[in-house]
Image (spheres, grey):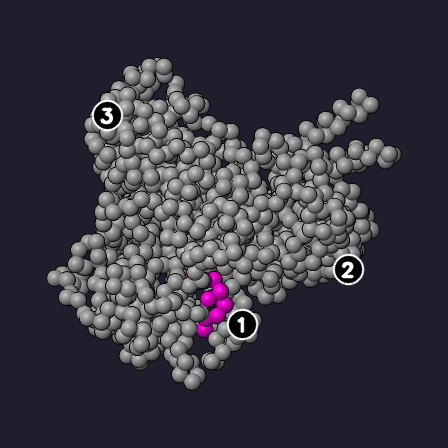
Amino acid sequence: MKRCMNLVDTGRRQFLRGGAAAAVGVAAGAGLRSEAKAAPALARVSYPSMRLANIADLKFNEPFEVAYPDGAAPGVLLKLGKAVEGGAGSDGDIVGFTTICPHKGFPLAYSPGDQTFNCPGHYSRFDVEAGGMQVWGHATQNLPQYVLRVDDKGDIYAEGVDELLYGRLSNVL
Amino acid sequence: MAYKRQIDRLPIIPADAKKHNVTCHYCIVGCGYHAYTWPVNKQGGTAPADNAFGADLSKQQDANADAWYSPSMYNIVKQNGKDVHIVIKPDAECSVNSGLGSIRGARMAENRFSPARMTQQQRLTDPMVWRYGQMHPTSWDDALDLVARVTAAVVKERGEDGLVVSMFDHGGSAGGYENTWGTGKLYFGAMKVKNVRIHNRPAYNSEVHGTRDMGIGELNNCYEDAELTDTIFLVGANSLETQTNYFLNHWVPNLRGSTIEKKKAQMPDEPHAAARIVIVDPRRTVTVNACEVEAGKDNVLHLALNSGTDLALFNALFTYIADKGWVDKALIEQHTLREATTRPPLYPARGIADSNPGHLSSFEDAVAGNHMSIEDAAKITGLKPEDIVKAAEWIAMPKEGGKRRRTMVAYEKGVIWGNDNYRTNGALVNIALATGNVGQMGGGCVRLGGHQEGYVRPSDAHVGRPATYVDRLLISGQGGIHHIWACDHYKTTLNADEFKRIYKKRTDMVKDAMSTVTWGDRAGMVEAIMAAVRQGGLFSVDIDIVPSKIGQASHVWLPAAESGEMNLTSMNGERRMRLVERYMDPPGNAKPDCLIAAGLAQNMERVLREAGNGSYADQFKGFDWKTEEDAFMDGYHQHASGGKFVTYDALRAMGNNGFQEPATSLHDGKIVGTKRVYSDGNFSTDDGKARFMDAPWRGLQAPGKEAQKTKFKYLINNGRANQIWQNAFLDQDNDFVMDRWPYPFIEMNPADMADLGVNEGDLVEVFNDEGATQAMVYPTGTAKKGETFMLFAFPTGVQGNVVNAGVNELILPNYKQTWANIRKLADKPAAVAHLTFKSKEYAAG
């Protein structure tokens, strides 16, 4: 019991420290309070490893519609034709993004001409070649990007997201 | 990679969280927010009964959902000494923003002082003094005693003119009625300080003397007028970036045509269509683009005139409209001055005095004096004659059935910080006044504003007009002590290079003198400081929330509190007044400015009495406020127009919609306000009649501008970006903002880039005879060749360094008309390598 209390304290201190750790702390704290639970809650949400497509499905600069981490979270995969930071696959040119604008939740439209997502709601723009950086706009986050893995068969798996998705206070509901 | 927070979930606001009214403390628009706080060891749940929204948070929320907040809206702060969770999110019920959050306001929580989450650790927590060769913390008593003794010593030797004051006059942020009254009562009540300036300009003057002299206060309509108007005439403003949610929530619906039913209901006897917009701006902005997206290109007229030629354009429009007879004859007859006044001897070059650089007169006199043909205006402005005519038609040609066209005239820094401020302002107001658009539904002739307002002070009449050019006074070695209230001249003044050079030299003299005395020897310290002051030194006291750039030169820092760390009242661009309820503690020992001013007054009284100067000491009585509410009751409640109806309790009850100033009565406990000013045609002049301004064009007015334009190759136009509030005093410590703009951008035409051999992201030096600064190249296809646009007032590259010292007769700076040369400094640095340099303009998919 004493040990358990120490853990609670540690969790709380972590929580107060900040940044990403704040969210971490809540998750840990929530789990620790319900002592009946067999396994302690984890520090971060558990992202599903989800097959979204095969490399063969992707065409250069054409958005391939997907949903991740669940059916209520639309997104796309894109093959950009040049290696970018965060790009997956042997060419390092495959990226995946949510297509819900992190400002007010409007659906983004892809502009293949300059490889940006554009929001018809309030004109925000995000650059898929620069990690979803907001070129201009109102969102206080850059565009959430998927963590991708490509296996030997060319299957593309999403295994995480790097920012909070619009419309949910936990990326995994 | 772009900055990512790696946050995958946020604590949920519990149903019993405390909810505070908040008006965003950044821009003029003043969007409504709520701050929710709850104990750090508690959290809400996803079930409707377990959260503040009563919503099922286990489901994805829809667009525009109230039940969502971004990581930037969350933090952990101190409240009554304890850590609490805080979420500051937009208020869907506020008529100003209807739930919209801008990229500035939606980061309020993230930009709060948080020891737990290490945000805004730059905030000052204690009074700091120059001791042992650097700034060290001390007590309030110690710091205020030193400031009072040095202030009293300087005043004794030089009179109150030896005290130079820079003080904010705004609302929001650390401003507000409480704090402008506190500082105002000290410097204009207890003292009569004449050498005083405001946060963004080198004198104590109005940015819009022109309109005020004509009898038209500059905030005279309501935001709903933008929904009701036929035409928006926008001048020198980029409202999508700088009045974001006013534009999105009130202009766009009209441009889209979705307010037509509202127009029909409120103005049933005339035809209605979607609004058209005329935009006067030398640069194509994201505002122009958004208007085209919403209204269609045929309904947007962008007049990309030559920089600084607005006055010629307005006079041509006025001439054309008057010739056509598209004016409100009844209004002119009944509510404006009808007899022409005698023209000044040096007309048209000068006004009757430097205090009145235009000539206030009758409609007919102004029509004659301002006469400008379309062809002449086209030559001066570089615009097509037919576009000027089209603008006149959109602004004033009667609607079907002969009904008067309703036009909202709105302007901001493009003309305020532009060529010939006074006359240009007057010439624009001439158009609105003649066409009957002041005080009427769907009209108004308004500045759009930068910050919110919150001004209540004793009379400033002793300052005089033109007011002292304070920067020049400091540069010329005058003044012995400088009190600075949240102003950062190092970032936000003109002629900044020279100012910094001299200011550093003068304050260093005092620092060196202070280092020769032990801290415990107060009498010796004051004498050493005074000896340095007599040699040309300057003692500098900086009251601010963070260590500012000018504060690097100061000898004392006094830590101030901000909105939300204190109760604070302000009004927005439609004079909507709200109370921000204190939701957290100020950092450490920081205090509201009004209470710092009170402490300074009390110390002055004590020190002066001790020195045997009892009668002067008595002038510093009346500062025995315990709270900011005491200062509010002493100031606004007693002195503002309609203030007697306004109390904190009444404001709390009015919530985030507040009321529109001035208050006229209390009805069932609610404050009754004023939707539009001048609806009765009674203007703000002694006889109630408005004046027209006879204000002929006179080229680039400020000294040195024409020569600079001839000598240097590039226009260095300058202004704001939507991500950054003011001079980035908080945003300089915000990862999201500084990741996007590690250096100020300078938008350049690609052909100019090729000429200079620079690429996107390269650092360039911008230089002329006034000084030099640096910026990061942002390729901009829509930029005119030879015309750049640089981010203003940014800490890592100060545009003011290359703005010359020339001002108008009323000491208004002319930041916009600046010319310089450009050369490459370096290839893009590491902090720039990951940035995007694509066009800022939205493109429909």
Q: Residue at x 64, y 58 (%)?
A: B64
Tell me the kind of residue under disc 2: Asp
Disc 3 vs disc 2: which is toward the camera?
3
Image height of A67 relative to A17, above or below: below
Magenta extent: B221-230
State the residue position of label 2. Answer: A57
Could you tell whether B240 is left or right of B41 in the image? left
Mark 1 vs mark 2: in front: 1
Q: CA distance from mark 3 to mark 2?
A: 88 Å
Left or right: residue B160 versus residue B20 is: left
Q: In percent of the image, x 75 and y 34: which residue is there?
A: A29
The residue indicated by pointer 1 is B262
Q: Is residue B480 above or below residue B784?
A: above
Going from N to C along the chain, the mark reached first, 1 or 3, is 1
Dominant SS in magenta: loop
Instruction: Compute the Cα span from label 1 to label 3.
Output: 65 Å
Query: How dense is the environment of label 1, judged by Cα within 10 Å: few (below 14), some, or many (20 and up)?
Result: some
Q: Residue at x 28, y 45 (%)?
A: B460
Tell me the kind of residue under disc 3. Answer: Asn
